[in-house]
Image: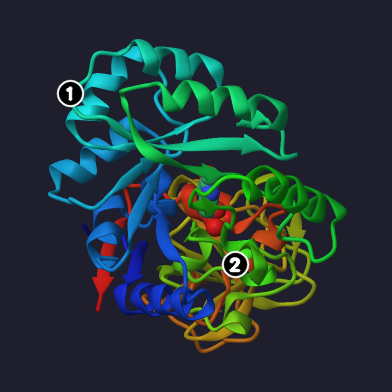
Amino acid sequence: MTRPSRVVIDKTALRHNFQRVRQLAPNSKIMAIIKADAYGHGLIRVAETLNEADAFGVACLEEAEQLREASISKPIVLLEGHHKASDLSRISELQLEVVIHNDNQLLTLEQAEINNALQLWLKIDTGMHRLGFAVDKIDNALNRITNCNNVVKPVRLMTHLATANEDKHPLTRQQLNLFEQVCKKLDFETTIANSAAILNFPETHREWIRPGLMLYGVSPMAGSDASQHGLNPVMTMESEIISIQHLKKGEPVGYGATWECPEDMPVGVVAAGYGDGFPRHAKSGTPVLVNNVRCALIGRASMDMLTVDLRNQPEAGIGDRVVLWGESLPIEEIATYADTIPYELLCGVHKRLQFIERD
Ligand SMILES: *Cc1c(COP(=O)(O)O)cnc(C)c1O
């Protein structure tokens, strides 16, 4: 691979962040969330590195199959449960755990002929209104589960918060109260917290927590970055300068000629673009590190290239290192400049990039 854009994965940072989660919630078991190719970091790589996790959470059977093929023997939870009745025999064979969130899943589970009973997480909709049984349907669902031989008892209860990344949104309190009401008469293990809740609402640390983003050293809260929470970024996206232009005042840069030089100035061309997962909507002014010095993106990012203002780094030359996010440049900040969230940037990192692991 001669193209200079690449992704560096810092496994030491990943392990550090995991320990930080343990420290924040010392009495909870950790279901490490590694869906979407571990938020773009590499499913197997992350699962092997987080060998102290109590379980892994993934979105679908295909992801779980990859983990089992890589000899990951820990509990694996399918966060959306089975998508089709015909998935159940494979799920049972691989001894996966399932989140059950609707009647149809419960019915197909009752009817299934499987060899190993499944550990089940019953998902309760406390107000996010995406997945889960309404609170008044829980008694019925639990009755059916109690009578179902395909389920390991006791089941576990789960809910998901819609606004935990905001300090004071009233919905969080409502959701917690409702979940409490359902759970207090039942003696089951429960789980509520994603990264934002782990950080903002310690009272949500139940028997299990479900960190995703924070494991990768990224903050789920707008306006804060992960270092404030003692987390270190795991992914650095980097590239190199492949050309330098010395442009005159008034000359435009890039597609659409949307940016004009305010004075005579050097402009660097970097070998990374939206084809690598750098957001095309990043505004002019988005920070880019050239030789560890903050410079500004100018003009539109194109497929394989982007352009930077080198007035802060006039001595920069071809081959010099450029960091687009990660070490010393929080992805949270880039997301803000691109009107998106760090989750989307991480998941959009293109697999054509060279991935390098650092320990
Ligand atoms: C993705 C996901 C998480 C992890 O969320 P983060 O914000 O990345 O910590 C937790 N629980 C469920 C059900 C999820 O789908």
Q: Residue at x 44, y 50 (%)?
A: 276
Q: Mark 2 is on which residue type?
A: Ile
Instruction: Give percent across and percent down for residue 57.
Output: 40, 48
Q: Which residue ends up furthest to the top in the rendered image?
A: 111
8 or 125, which lies in front? Answer: 125
Q: Residue at x 66, y 24 (%)?
A: 137
Q: Secondary structure at mark 2?
A: helix
Q: Mark 1 is on which residue type?
A: Asn
Instruction: Identify residue for label 2.
Output: 198
Left or right: residue 142 versus residue 294 is left
Instruction: Identify residue for label 1.
Output: 115
Whether 154 is drawn above or below 240: the answer is: above
Q: Is residue 278 visible?
A: no
> Is label 1 in contact with label 2 (beta carbons under 8 Å)?
no
Left or right: residue 284 versus residue 158 is right
Q: How is the image coloured?
A: rainbow
Whether 146 is drawn above or below 54: the answer is: above
Q: How packed is label 2: few (under 14 Cα within 10 Å), some, or many (20 or more)?
A: many
Whether 254 is drawn above or below 201: the answer is: above
Q: Quadrant of residue 11?
A: bottom left
Quadrant placement of the C terminus: bottom left
Instruction: Give percent across and percent down for residue 163.
Output: 75, 53
Mark 2 lies within 8 Å of ligand 1 (Cβ measured): yes
Left or right: residue 128 versus residue 359 is right
Earlier in the chain: of badge 1 and badge 2, it is: 1
168 or 334, which lies in front? Answer: 168
- Count of number-bearing discs: 2
- Disc assigned to residue 261: none
238 or 211, which lies in front? Answer: 211
Q: Quadrant of residue 237?
A: bottom left
